Each structure stands twice: as structure tokens, then as C-alpha cells.
Image: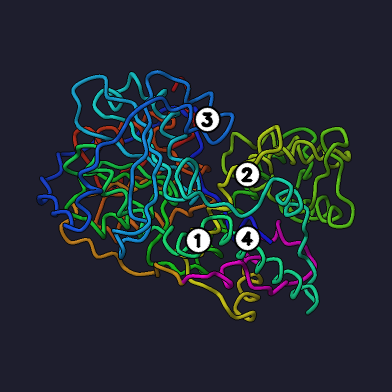
């Protein structure tokens, strides 16, 4: 049911990358207009006081429990209207994590890792440790928040229990016959119903989109004591940033948008482009693999896609044992595990090992990669990241309600990324969004950002999930600056590349933008 390239969770990856040549930032940005006044009907939300305390109780996973058990971190919940058209009605609560600035404080740096569905609190905890002794950690409170419906925020999106997740991952949905299409659509309709019932009702699902998240962010900005917003968003987090810029341009101090979604692009075109991006990443992996001894895809990169298909397609009929026979690797999980490894070139050796193991009949490595993508821990418990992705996308994205249009999208996607084509034909079944109980709240458009100060968009030339051109287009749409980064990974800011990090830090701290045409590289340099 859930196609990992129709619904890709895009979250920030970290990598230890070295300095490459780049230019020094230029002169400071001019001062922006004064912030806009808050709506009177929302005064009680804007004027609330947060009750900060230990973060341990906010953890949504075992890894979060370990990361949140840190005296330097403090957490709270922000109350917001569930429906902004009814501010006196039902409310939601947003999980917020903070590490205070250690020096001369400028304000808060709000961070979001993307998804939609990834935890900003988890990212905030991770970044706080990395940035504690940096200029950013000295000058800013590092603040991560879980958008409404995600992680520690309530109501929490919930669609599948752990047992249902295991069934979902084994479900093939490869039968293109009318019977197969009807079965897949029935499953997708059931998925939408379960999300509605388990997440708190149709009113929750109607109000979890980016339109509402940016209003939450503005309340959070004010409650944190910041006159204007300083924000770093990765991947889908760039949509939050650009939508905030449109809704509250006069409330922006600085926006760094890394791994951009183009707000003018249609859902269909973005999906096709994303498939093409992952095929490009697969081809780059195959070319690198071909230079290594015992590459499971062979020594001819031109044949790598066909070899991958020959290796993975038999899983449709005969799943491979994994974890010593305790689990089995399905065809969808093999493709999902591969996609997970393509986000970052550091994972390529692991992918090569996983494909070699699969050739020998062992699916364990690819299963573990698929577990990482699907937010499953070692005890078999699932987070809600993928579920939140689907739910939020259903109100953020254009909706496909015609089978012919859905079939054409799948055909074009398979053509763009043949490595993940199952070879059984197009299953033109409507996805869960076609059965959603609420209409979309966003649509593709050119942002209207009069009064917005200069922004910084970062785009990696070989980004598989958010292709480079989307960053070029977003920077242009916001009339902001673009930092181009040569490399092959998804997002890069504040992840260890000195060239990128120096430019991003100079902008966030001093509002200094890089010169036009600024470029960095992820390639190691001798002695770098």
C-alpha cells in the first residue's frame, strides 16, 4: 500500500565531511520590517507561559529516552487551537525541546528535520550536543519541536498497531488486474478509516497540514520571547519555512532551507522527479560498487538496474529469511531498504553488503535498513513517522481521485526509477488520500513574500530525495540566496562540512549572506 517513493520520508542525515574551497560571506543583510501584530482572538495562546521540565517523559522511542536524559535539555508543551477557525474549541499540544544558549543570546534557533512526520525534538537533542560549544550553541537556544500530530505532540497521529505494520510491510500489491486493484483500494480505504478513528477524528486529520503548523510556529516564536523567527528546516522542513515566510514575512529574521521542496511544483511532477533522483543515486552507487571487488551488481554499471531487478524480483514469490529465520524479507522491504541506503553515500558499503547477502539467501541487512526507514526499533515497536507522513501529505498535496491519472503517475515513476519497478505491470489503485475525510489545505503556487528579508537555500547537486533544481527554484521564488553543494546526499547544513557550516553559521549569527554563485563540495580534499 505505502510506496516508498510515492511517500518518501525525508529527514536530515548526518555525515562527517571535510572542508572544500568556498567563498567568504558578503555584507550584512538590511534590517527587516517590524513584526506583525498577533490576532486578538489568539491572545491566550500567544501569551501563555510554558512549564519547562525534564524531557524524559516526552520520549517517543528508546533512542529518544536515552538522548532526552540530559540535564542540559528542557521540554514543555505548547497549547494551540486544533482548528484556527475555532480558537475557543478543541486544542492541540506541541512538544518542544530546548537547550539554552551558553553565551550572549541572540534568540532561539528553531529546527525541523523534515518528513513530514520526523521528530524535531529528536533533531533538537542531537543538534544541541553537536552545537553546544559552537557559535550557534553559544548565541542561540537550540529548539526542536514536534509538529502537530507527530511524536510527543497530541493528538498523535496513529493508523497501524505494531502487528498491522508487519502485515503492511509484507503486502505486495503487485496485481494489476481489476481484482487486484479493488483489493488494494479496499486496503487503502481501510487505512484512511483507521487513521481517522485512531488519531482522534476527522477534525484532527483536517488540521494537521503545513497551513496549521506555521501558525503554531508563530505562536511558539512569540512564547519563546523572540521578536522574529530564526529557523533551519531540512527537506519537508523547507516547506514549513517557505509557508511561514508567506504567512508571516515580517516576523522572519533568518531562514535556512536545506533540501528544498519547490512550492510551485505539482505533486505529480515532484513524485516523478524524486523517483528520477533516486535512480540517479542508484546509478552513482552502482558505478562506485563496480570499482570494488565482488560488487553484487557486477562490473558493468549499465547493467546494474537489470541485475538489481533479477536479485530482488524473486522475493515477490519467495521472501528471503532474515535475522536467522525469525523474520522474512519481502520485495517491498528490499526496495525500501535500498532507498534508505541511497540517502547518503556513507551507506553504500552497507547496501553493497546487503545485496551480497541477499544473493546468498540472507535478507537481514536489507531488512535492518528497511526497519530504519519504517521507524521500527529492535523490540518491534514502530514510531508514527510514516503514518504522520501519509496523513499530513493527504492534506498538503494535490489529491488523485481518478484511476487513469494514478496509473499514469505510477507508469511515469517506474520509467523514471526502473530499479524499483516490480515488473508486474501498473496497479492503478487509488491511494489512501483519495478516501480522506477532509479536503487538502494547500496547493502549488508562487509564494507571496513581500517584506521578507533575504533567506538562504542550500541545495546538493546529487540529492536523491529533493533534487537540486527544487532548491534553485525555491531560492528564486523567495528572492533569496542559494548555496550550491557538489555531492551525493540528502541535506548537508551543520553536518560537519566546514565550507557549508561556516556559511550557514555566518548567516544565522551575523545575517551575512554568501556571494552569488557560492559553492561548496562534499568531496574530501587532500589534507582537508
- Is disc 1 placed on a helix, strand or loop? helix
Which is more foreground, mark 4 or mark 3? 4
**Residue 64 has which mark?**
3
Which is more foreground, mark 3 or mark 2? 3
What's the distance in space between the residues labelled 3 and 2, CA to CA? 16 Å
Residue 232 in the image: x percent, y percent? 34, 42
Q: Which comes before the other along the chain, label 2 or label 4?
A: 4
**Residue 393 has which mark?**
1
Q: Which residues are magenta?
A: 413-438
Task: State which quarter of the image contains the C terminus.
Answer: top left
- Is disc 4 placed on a helix, strand or loop? helix
Q: Which comes before the other along the chain, label 1 or label 4?
A: 4
- The residue carrying mark 2 is 373
Q: Which comes before the other along the chain, label 1 or label 3?
A: 3
Q: Residue at x 41, y 29 (%)?
A: 127
**Residue 194 has which mark?**
4
Which is more foreground, mark 1 or mark 4? 4
Residue 12 in the image: x percent, y percent? 48, 40
Amino acid at each position: 500500500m505505502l510506496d516508498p517513493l510515492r511517500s518518501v520520508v525525508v529527514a536530515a542525515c548526518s555525515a562527517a565531511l571535510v572542508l572544500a574551497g568556498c567563498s567568504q560571506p558578503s555584507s550584512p543583510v538590511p534590517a527587516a520590517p517590524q513584526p506583525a501584530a498577533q490576532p486578538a482572538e489568539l491572545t491566550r495562546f500567544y501569551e501563555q507561559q510554558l512549564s519547562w521540565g525534564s524531557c524524559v517523559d516526552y520520549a517517543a522511542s528508546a533512542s529518544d529516552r536515552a538522548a532526552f536524559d540530559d540535564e542540559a535539555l528542557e521540554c514543555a508543551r505548547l497549547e494551540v487551537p486544533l482548528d484556527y477557525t475555532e480558537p475557543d474549541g478543541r486544542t492541540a499540544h506541541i512538544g518542544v525541546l530546548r537547550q539554552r544558549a551558553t553565551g550572549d543570546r541572540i534568540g532561539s534557533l528553531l529546527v525541523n528535520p523534515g518528513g513530514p512526520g520526523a521528530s524535531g525534538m529528536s533533531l533538537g537533542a542531537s543538534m544541541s550536543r553537536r552545537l553546544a560549544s559552537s557559535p550557534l550553541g553559544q548565541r542561540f537556544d537550540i529548539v526542536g519541536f514536534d509538529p502537530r500530530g507527530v511524536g510527543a505532540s497530541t493528538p498523535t497521529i496513529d493508523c497501524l498497531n505494531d502487528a498491522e505494520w508487519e502485515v503492511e510491510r509484507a503486502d505486495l500489491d503487485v496485481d494489476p488486474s481489476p481484482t487486484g486493484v479493488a483489493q488494494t483500494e479496499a486496503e487503502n480505504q481501510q487505512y484512511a478509516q483507521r487513521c481517522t478513528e485512531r488519531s482522534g477524528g476527522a477534525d484532527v486529520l483536517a488540521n494537521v497540514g503545513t497551513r496549521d503548523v506555521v501558525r503554531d510556529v508563530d505562536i511558539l516564536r512569540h512564547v519563546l520571547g523572540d521578536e522574529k523567527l530564526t529557523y533551519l528546516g531540512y527537506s519537508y522542513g523547507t516547506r514549513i519555512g517557505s509557508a511561514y515566510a508567506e504567512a508571516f514575512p515580517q516576523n522572519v529574521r533568518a531562514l535556512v532551507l536545506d533540501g528544498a521542496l519547490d512550492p510551485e511544483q505539482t505533486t505529480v511532477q515532484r513524485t516523478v522527479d524524486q523517483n528520477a533522483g533516486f535512480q540517479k543515486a542508484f546509478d552513482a552507487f552502482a558505478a562506485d560498487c563496480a570499482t570494488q571487488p565482488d560488487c553484487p551488481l557486477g562490473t558493468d554499471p549499465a547493467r546494474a538496474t537489470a541485475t538489481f531487478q533479477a536479485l530482488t524480483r524473486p522475493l515477490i514469490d519467495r521472501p528471503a529469511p532474515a535475522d536467522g529465520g525469525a523474520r522474512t524479507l519481502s520485495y517491498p522491504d528490499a526496495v525500501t531498504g535500498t532507498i534508505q541506503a541511497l540517502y547518503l553515500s556513507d551507506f553504500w558499503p552497507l547496501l553493497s553488503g546487503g545485496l551480497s547477502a541477499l544473493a546468498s539467501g540472507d535478507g537481514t541487512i536489507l531488512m535492518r535498513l528497511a526497519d530504519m526507514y519504517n521507524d521500527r526499533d529492535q523490540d518491534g515497536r514502530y514510531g508514527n513517522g510514516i503514518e504522520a507522513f501519509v496523513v499530513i501529505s493527504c492534506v498538503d498535496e494535490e489529491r488523485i481521485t481518478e484511476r487513469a491519472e494514478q496509473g499514469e503517475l505510477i507508469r511515469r515513476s517506474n520509467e523514471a526509477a526502473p530499479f524499483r519497478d516490480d515488473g508486474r505491470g501498473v496497479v492503478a489503485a487509488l491511494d489512501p488520500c483519495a478516501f480522506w475525510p477532509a479536503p487538502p489545505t494547500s496547493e502549488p503556487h508562487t509564494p507571496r513574500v513581500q517584506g521578507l528579508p533575504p533567506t538562504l537555500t542550500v541545495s546538493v547537486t546529487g540529492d536523491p530525495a529533493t533534487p537540486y533544481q527544487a532548491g534553485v527554484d525555491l531560492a528564486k521564488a523567495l528572492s533569496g540566496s542559494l548555496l550550491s553543494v557538489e555531492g551525493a546526499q540528502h541535506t548537508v547544513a551543520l553536518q560537519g562540512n566546514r565550507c557549508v557550516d561556516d556559511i550557514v553559521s555566518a548567516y544565522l549569527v551575523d545575517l551575512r549572506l554568501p556571494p552569488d554563485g557560492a559553492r561548496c563540495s562534499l568531496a574530501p580534499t587532500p589534507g582537508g
